[in-house]
Amino acid sequence: MLLIHCPHCQEYRDEEEFSYGGEAHIVRPLEPEALSDEEWGDYLFFRTNSRGIHHEMWYHLVGCRRYFNATRNTVTYEILETYKTGTQPTITGANL
Amino acid sequence: MSLNRLQTHTGTTLDFTFNGKAYQGIAGDTLASALLANGVNVVGRSFKFARPRGIFGHGAEEPNGIIQLGSGAGTVPNLKATQVELYQDLEASSVNGWPSVNYDVMGIIGAFGRLMPPGFYYKTFMYPKKLWMTYERFIRKAAGLGATPVEADPDSYDKLNQHCDVLVVGAGPAGLVAAREAARTGARVIVADEQSEFGGSLLASKQAIDGLQATNWVASLVAELRACNNVQLLPRSTVFGYYDHNFLTILERRTDHLGLTAAQGVRQRMHRVRAAQVVLATGAFERPLVFAHNDIPGVMLASSVSTYVNRYGVAPGNKLVVFTTNDNAYQTALDWHETGRDVVAVIDTRSNPSGDIVAAVKAKGISVIAGHGLIEAQGNQRVKRALIAPINALGTEVTGPVRRLDCDLIACSGGWSPAIHLSSHTGAKPVWDESIVGFRPGESKQQERSAGACRGTFDLIGCLAEGATAGAEAAKMSGYGEGIPQFPCSAVEEFVEQPQQALFLVPHIKSISRAPSQFVDFQLDVSASGIELAVREGFESVEHVKRYTALGFGTDQGKLGNINGMAILANALDQTIAETGTTIFRPSYTPTTFGAIAGRDVTNLFDPERYTAMHRWHVEQGAEFEDVGQWKRPWYFPQNNETMQESVNREGLAVRNTVGILDASTLGKIDIQGPDAAEFITRMYTNSYLKLAPGKCRYGVMLKEDGMIFDDGVCACLGENHYLMFTTTGGAAGVLAWLELWQQTEWPDLQVYFTSVTDHWTTATVTGPNARKVIAKVCSDIELSNEAFSFMDWRDGTVAGVKARIFRISFTGELSYEVNVPAHYGRHVWEALMAAGEEFNITPYGTETMHVLRAEKGFIIVGQDTDGSMTPADMNMDWVVGKNKTFSFVGKRSLYRSDSVRENRKQLVGLKTLQGSDVLPEGAQVVFDAKQKIPMSMQGHVTSSYFSASLGHSIALAVVKGGHSRLGLIVHCPLADGRIIAAEIVSSVFYDPKGERHHV
Amino acid sequence: MSKSIKLESPLHYFHAALNRKPEPVKSPAGALFNDEAEYGLVVKEATLSAHLNLRGDGSNAHFCSEVTEALGLMVPLTPGTYQRNGNTSIYWLGPSEWLLVEIGGDAEELETRLRKTLTGHISIVDISGGQTCINLRGPGVATVLKKSSIYDFEAWDNATSALGRAVQTNFAKASAIISNKSDGSYDLVIRRSFADYVAQWLLDAGEEFGCRIEAEKE
């Protein structure tokens, strides 16, 4: 059971209050109609599925109802940081 | 006084029975110590060979004394006799052994071993597969794995969520001093120990600490801890799992020791602990020596013999032979000598033992036979003699003549294995250390550290020092204290010890494969030759050998057998133990009851039942209920012993002919406010809301980004920048999260707020040709004419004196008014509507009738007629997609993906059975040609199907490949019972296709 | 509204059912809890109250001062806290979301007052019918909270009459907004549809202390 620091509630809260939101920082194409099926399919279905550092969204469902992002090591389940939506991670695969 | 009870040990007498026979024990006994006191040799039969087995250990490591406690509803299978505290009238039996442990049929036939060589399961699974069920039944009956109670458990269990700064696991010497150091800093401390008393190994020790006898030192320290209000002491509490982010689970047995029915209150409690820091002080298990027939009752661990003597006042035999590879076990000879019973000899595999305790033993005149191995035990249901022989220095072969020593008890010690289980749960990889001949805990993966014997530190002074450091350090890392132990190091008598010998398999005069069985894992009858056989058959990985031989698979999880097993494997593979490695320990450390895992979440509390404000009214009317998510919704309202179909017919006809009333409160409702509300809603639905005026409603479909229907409902414009969105009952929470996701992460620039108002509003749907007349009787401030208040309008007004919001939307196809009032007034308004409708025979109807009525109209239910792979076009709902919307709403682009526009997608149609009385089962498969060979080519399936009383025949909705262009085609539904029902593909709208009835 | 209109709290039928079956709860020792003082857990439902969900930009000083002007109360900006003035409390639910409760208050009047004063992008939603306040007191409370929620209530500082801690979290298998009071008791705001479940849970979880559930007159 993970312990997750909610950047809005500013405290560690238990995993059972949250729901997982999938990979973070995937920006919706501004002009979907301009994309080929393949390009749209990439946006829709393909994820990095990283081994190691992974940036992902979490929703504090039974709490402040805010989405935020976490940098998590998918091997150890260690959460290295959490940060508000719209901001960038300080820890990335490149700088670890 | 029982046979083996020492005169010096007295206490309250307790009566108990074992396998139906009456015995007496003394308060403070475990079932194991009481059985040993009574001279009970055989407590069970081994799993595979059905060999008689006796008590071997004294704690969680016990492989043989597996018992069934009690009978009836409270019975518990698979408990270890060494961990069951004795109470008055305790009733226990062996889990293995049929028909009785003393005369085991299988043991006498001796056939089982030949039936079940190592790898039996795998060989049997592979060929012949179909026989496995037969074998399995036979194995279970003969081997016995205990019986689960068939009645409901009468006891209560619960869970406690705990938070602490320092969790100390184990209250032996290291754990106790760790707790003392942590407690001193003011940190919140929890100390858990699986035994009834704190002290661990000190409970059976005669060593002096700080001038106090060990047990007295423990008592004073425990009293000190008990006085601290920042410390929680949990005896009888096993930490059985260590999970991510320092989350640990503890099973506390609160009343088990009082008897199965003795106490009210909570029998077992699971503590779910989030600890900032953990100190593991779980001790070590003594390692048995693997020699021929080492499983005969009367062979025990040396430390267990000492524990029974010193702690329980039980001497489990008369003539003791100690067999050891180390100095430690010599203490057992001294303890036994003190009882006045005979120590035949100490057999030491080392050629020249000379430590302090060795000298003490020799000084007592006890015979020490060095450079020898005890190569075989003999006896049937009890050890009668030991065969000993000189062995070489490496311990690999017998080098001289065999001698016989008469004895009835063999205490063996192959050294100590740290209990690294919990550290292993965290993913830390155990590290082999030759110097302790054992695995030490690996590098920490969590906020934990090990101290004392579980870290491979076996001397008392070392344990105390490590415990103190660990406690202080853990406290500091959780923000308390300086990290330096504050209490002076305890003064302990020290002994000079010689190194132990690493010996994992005692040689026999015969080769491994020919020698009498040398058992490694007692519970599952894994022998040294079995492991060798696995290697000969080509298994190399320790994980594979474990599964092939079942080594460590028992309820003791290989606490005794694993190290010897790995070492024998390493030797057979010609590898080092470090190269071979160990298997991974996983939770649970010891078996955990389902009761404790379930806690209070049982029966009426298993899952919340959500009620509407009218729930009790429905109950009073005798409604049958249907679960919709967690909601209890009235399913139908039977009258006068009606069948469900009769009720549904009556309710449906009432709606079509006069007026019905439905509790629609469970629909999800989301209040949406903000200057960009309309823009946002328009991005989420397939159609546009930009021009929806206050007082108006619109039906919308929501798609996931893949273009598939996800939810539907009506959205009303309440005022400027203010909307109310209805969702499906089951979709309420998901839709709210979906809206928040898009607003918060994709379009934070859109100014809009969402608030759930599902629970705030109660909804009574009044529907049918007489609906307007009913509403008119209770509402005088809304102009109800069709012109003033049209279909898809809503109005504020007063209903039965309560401020209400009425929507003219319809899920039945009839004239409908959905009356919404704050839920506190729900029942009042409902009853007023019932009274107003009385003259029109207003009929309450449930979800089943609602389903029939909407299916007659061809209205879909998301999740029933759709399954996450349906586009609006598939549902024949292209009309709801706003093709001219400027913004690419969620899911829009996917509607043009090649797969979304391909021919032959499953499309929603109606099915009319040729025999109108035939009602197709939902889920029935649709085929075009009923005469084709099986497996048939399936072309679709039935999603909704009912008998329509209004139409006088059955109706069904189905999704059929290319269905929209196949109207008129006769299709077939082959059913499981052999019938094939023919039906015609028709429009999905069966009733009032022009939609005239709801516009009146 | 007319006096003939019946109002029912979410626990109306729970109370009614309990009153029909006034069986005292047995303690672990077998004694019966007959006297209120002996109950380790007393659950009391507050009178029906005004509950408003308030949304706005907490980082906007105008918004905060407008709320204060309308209510005579500061908007709590510290996560996990509430502010209280007499019967009126504002609970922090999120960075832009608060719960406003006026015990025994009139939601419509409160909403009108706020709408008159508040400007800009805000949202005010009456949710009075959807929830109820219950108070948990007695020596068993801390343990019952541990049984029911994974949140660490021990870590909280004591409340005063004007401010305290509040958290929205899981409560058994429902959710609740839980806050502490200066008298050491706890308030729970629970959802209407889950109220019966929560009451049954409390009776069960509080059984070992002796548990009583009482209603304010409706």
Image: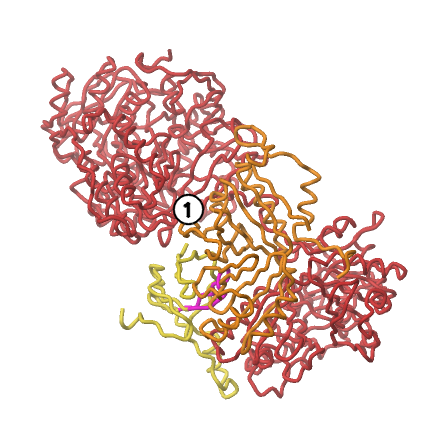
- Stretch in magenta: A56-68
Figure chain in yellow: A
Whole-percent x and y of residue B651?
82, 59
Whole-percent x and y of residue B213?
23, 24
Relative placement, left or right, of B413 versus B111 is left
Relative placement, left or right, of C71 versus B788 is left
Tell me which amino acid carries mark 1: Gln
Q: Residue furthest right?
A: B839
Q: Nearer the viewer, residue B944 or B245?
A: B245
Q: Colour of chain C?
A: orange
Q: Nearer the viewer, residue B46 or B988?
A: B988
Q: Is residue B138 above or below residue B647?
A: above
Q: Residue at x 53, y 44 (%)?
A: C137
What quarter of the picture does the C terminus of chain B occupy? bottom right
Q: Is residue B416 above or below residue B186?
A: above
Q: Nearer the viewer, residue B727 or C195?
A: C195
Whole-percent x and y of residue B86?
42, 24
Magenta highlight on residue A64: yes
What quarter of the picture does the N terminus of chain B occupy? top left
Whole-percent x and y of residue B56?
33, 27
| Circle 1 residue | B162
Figure chain in red: B
Magenta highlight on residue C193: no
